[in-house]
Amino acid sequence: MLRRELDRHAGRELTVVDVGGGTGGFAVPLAQSGHRVTVVDASPDALAALTRRAADAGVAERVRAVQGDGDALAGLVEPASVDLILAHAVLEVVDQPADVVAAVAAALRPGGAVSVLVAGRAAAVLGRAINGHLRSASALVTDPDGRAGARDTLRRRYDAESAADLLRSAGLEVEETHGVRVLTDLLPAAVVEEDPQALLELELALSARPPFRDIASQLHLFARRP
């Protein structure tokens, strides 16, 4: 989906914001493709690594590092100034996801797009149940936020509809929803390692097909500001 979005703007320099972009796994390749990328991340160490990585790749002038987190996005990015926003593994950890999504929508230019990746509740239930942690699995089912208790490292998990509703509540139009790691995290390591190409092909075949999509470890939603 990201490749298709970039292809739609072939020959044009895009303004991109990567929220929680860390060391630049997405930012540096985007900069190498000719786009200008701002990475917003709370970790100074990650941003230092990002700066070194961008310099090593020869794109330091196209990558900007800003210390902050998703909850502070509204104060870090100018309204209606961004063509593409990445918010991967962000909405499950911020204090107020609705405020973050509202800030994302406000930062996008009309027609701009956002790529959102969130943790899936169903996958967490299945994973714990398969490994014999039945009480933890039950807690994930009944907890309003999809948490497995006070020691859970995530503040919330989503299903496809709750994630889409969150984006729509900010006026964004959800165009596509896919599952990421539909089966991989449920399979024994020996099966994963035996034929990774076959597994990849199966993952791609299942990624957009409910109900398989809905048990993925992560859900990827691509939405647009009208």
Image (spheres, rainbow, N blue to C red):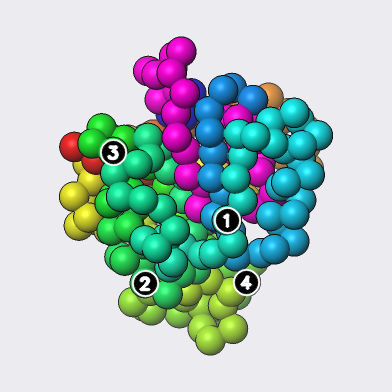
Q: Residue at x 36, y 66 (%)?
A: 97
Q: Label 4, label 2: how many angstroms apart (C-alpha)?
A: 32 Å
Q: Which residue is mark 4?
A: 132
Of tags 3 and 4, which is closer to the observer?
3
Precedes in sequence: disc 2 or disc 3:
2
Quadrant position of the C terminus in the picture: top left
**Residues at marks 2 and 3 touching, judged by CB atoms closer than 8 Å:** no
Q: Tag 4: residue type?
A: Gly
Alpha-carbon span between mark 3 and mark 1:
20 Å
Q: Callout 1: 10 Å neighbours few (<14), some, many (20+)?
A: some
Which span is picked out in magenta? 4-31
**Secondary structure at numbered mark 2:** loop
Q: Considering depth in this image, is 135 or 13 the residue closer to the camera? A: 13
Describe residue 31's horizontal placement relative to residue 220 as left or right. Answer: right
Image mark for residue 96: 2
**Badge count:** 4
Residue tagged by mark 3? 109
User: Hey, what amino acid is under mark 1?
Assistant: Val
Q: Can you give x and y, in whole percent of width and height, for residue 11 in the image?
A: 46, 13
**Residue at figure coordinates x 39%, y 19% from the top left:** 9
Residue 84, percent from left and from top = 41, 37
Distance between the alpha carbons at the discs numbered 2 and 3: 22 Å
Q: Sequence order check: which comes first, mark 4 or mark 2?
A: 2
Q: In the image, is residue 12 part of the stretch drawn in magenta? A: yes
Which label is found at residue 66? 1
Q: CA distance from mark 3 to mark 4?
A: 47 Å
**C-alpha span from label 4 to label 1:** 42 Å
Q: Nearer the viewer, mark 2 or mark 1?
A: 1
Whole-percent x, y for residue 104 in the image: 34, 52
Q: Residue at x 60, y 45 (%)?
A: 64
